[in-house]
Image (cartoon, rainbow, N blue to C red):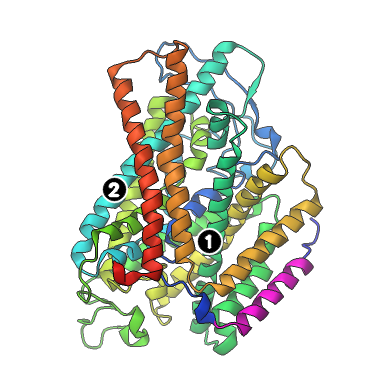
Amino acid sequence: MKPFPLRGSAIAITIAVFLSETTTPDAFLLPSPSASACATAVADAASSSQNFYTREKHHRIKTLSTLRGGGSRSGGVNARRVKSLRNAASSDDMNDDSSKDGSNEQSIPTAALNLIKGCVGSGVLSLPAGVAALGDVPKAILPASAIVLTLGAISAYTFHLLGRLTYVTIDENGKKESKQTSTINSIGDLWEYEVGKSSSWLVSASIFLTCFMTCLAYSIILGDTFSSLAETAGLTGLMSSRRTSILLITLTAVYPLSCLKSLAALAPVSLMGNIGILMTCIVMTIRALPGGAYSPTAAIGATNFLRSLPAELQPSFGVTGFRSPRSLLILSSMTACAYLVHMVGPEFYQTMKDPSVVRFGILSAVGFGGTALISAFMMCVGFLTFGGACKGMILNNYSTLDKGATLCRLLMGISLLGSYAFLSKGMRSAFYEIFYKGKEITDKIHYRTMQILIGILTTLALFLGDAGFVVSVTGAVLGSSLIYIIPPYLFLKSTKRRTTDGSLTTTSTLKFERLWNKFLICLGVFFAVAGAGMSVANTFFPHLL
């Protein structure tokens, strides 16, 4: 492998740190209870699917298979052995040569675990802040849990829509018995098939912006995480500052990992992420128990970390009570992004063993159901520990003297580094799709692109103490678009086309479902506009809430 050309990136980062040290930091702080809430789960989904939306790997194109016998619309399709995006972090699928022996097919349990793994990442650690935006009373977890579970069900439905549309596309092309190939491996490919190529760049742009803003949130989180670890290790002053942490992590890990073309070496990161989430769940649950280490009613002589926390991080209950119900929109924006794995819906369908609409429906129900339950549980234990003081990354609330929390920070920090690498690959692939489509990507273009992107991300991370405002707005708009707007719109386009050409019969059930999908589009537009507005109000005009 060629050595990484660090010079350009180092110059950009040096300029950034100079500016950051000579500018009043407070002028750039954007305080928000949802520091990285809306984007972190997106990254976990994208990180496990590192080559999403890339056209630079043409081996993803497959020859369409013909349908197996049977007249059911939910019959199985013998799909090709495509590179599994969801197993990208745990198999050799990250290499350019995919297995063609069928070993990459996923059973429903395996696919469900991969789906849950993609959703239940560091994103769930931001959800307690969404409850804190609603109020600082324990009863706030009731409407918050209802939001998480309801939006989880809707997300499962729209995810299932993508599988159904993928099936229809394979069905139609298979019946043509033509020799043409299909690239229905992503939501962008579905858009090209149903809507047209001229506007497909909109989907690529959405993916790029989502990945970009998630990388920004990750840079900030990594700065906070390793700064806390430095304090735990006894470092002080400049060596424990978040800006120093961001610079060191970027130069030594983020940039080199982001430049990797093959990510097979990062396979253990997926396991590390799972262990980190499991360990964090256990530690948070123990800390939330009555009389625990963060409880003011802890028994005399018991371990208690309250004295080591600054006032703004200590548990806060009953001070402000319930805030305006409009604050639920902030949690809705976070939750939308916590379920955002729709980008790989078509790929999930085609990598299933014996794929069918019914089996994909089971996968959607199990995967999103498990995600909803785990997310709601961790959201509740985090909020019940710190109440209205919950930060955008709940681990920031725990004391640097807490060994359990320190272990969780270390595991999650390592996991985030790997996730950053996977995510940056998706970001640059979408970038190439927009600006270099059909062109050869040389090493010069590759490294220059990453130098520019990582340089911009690092500069923003140095200036922004909390990316909550930018991330919340981006999450509200892009999350709502990719979950509530694009899949229903594709469904409406597909069903209208098929009823017009006579391949689909208009029934009362179809009419109702089309009406339901129109409602979802309206709901998505509402969440995008209102969620973004609430993020602005929560950041700049909190007194209005």
Residue density around tag 2, few if under 14, some if 14–19, many if 20 or more, within 10 Å: many
Q: Image quadrant of residue 83? A: top right
- Identity of the residue drawn at 53% across and 16% down: 172
**Residue 386, placed above or below residue 326:** below
Secondary structure, mark 2, is helix
For residue 108, say whether it is visible.
no
Residue that numbered label 1 is attached to: 415
Choose the circle earlier in sequence order: 1 or 2.
2
- x 29%, y 60%: residue: 327
Q: Image quadrant of residue 216?
A: bottom right
Magenta: main secondary structure equals helix
- Which amino acid type is shown beneath numbered disc 2? Leu
Give the percent coordinates (x, y) of residue 153: 31, 41
Q: Nearer the viewer, mark 1 or mark 2?
A: 2
Circle 1: element type? helix
* Residue 368: assigned label: none
Classify 10 Å Cα crowding around label 1: few (below 14), some (14-19), many (20 and above): many
The label number, if any, that marks residue 149 in the structure image:
2
Spot occupied by residue 124 in the image (x, y as percentages of width and height): 39, 58
Task: State which quarter of the image contains the C terminus.
Answer: bottom left
- Give the residues in magenta: 7-24
Q: Nearer the viewer, residue 436 or 167?
A: 436
Looking at the picture, how far across and down is residue 473, in whole percent? 45, 57
Q: Is residue 69 left or right of residue 258?
A: left
Residue 477 relative to residue 517: left or right? right
Kind of residue indicated by mark 1: Ser
Quadrant holding the N terminus: bottom right
Residue 205's place in the image compared with 388, above or below, is above
Residue 190 locus on image (x, y percent): 54, 31
Residue toward you, 283 or 194: 194
Nearer to me, 203 or 98: 203
Residue 438 visible in the displayed image: yes
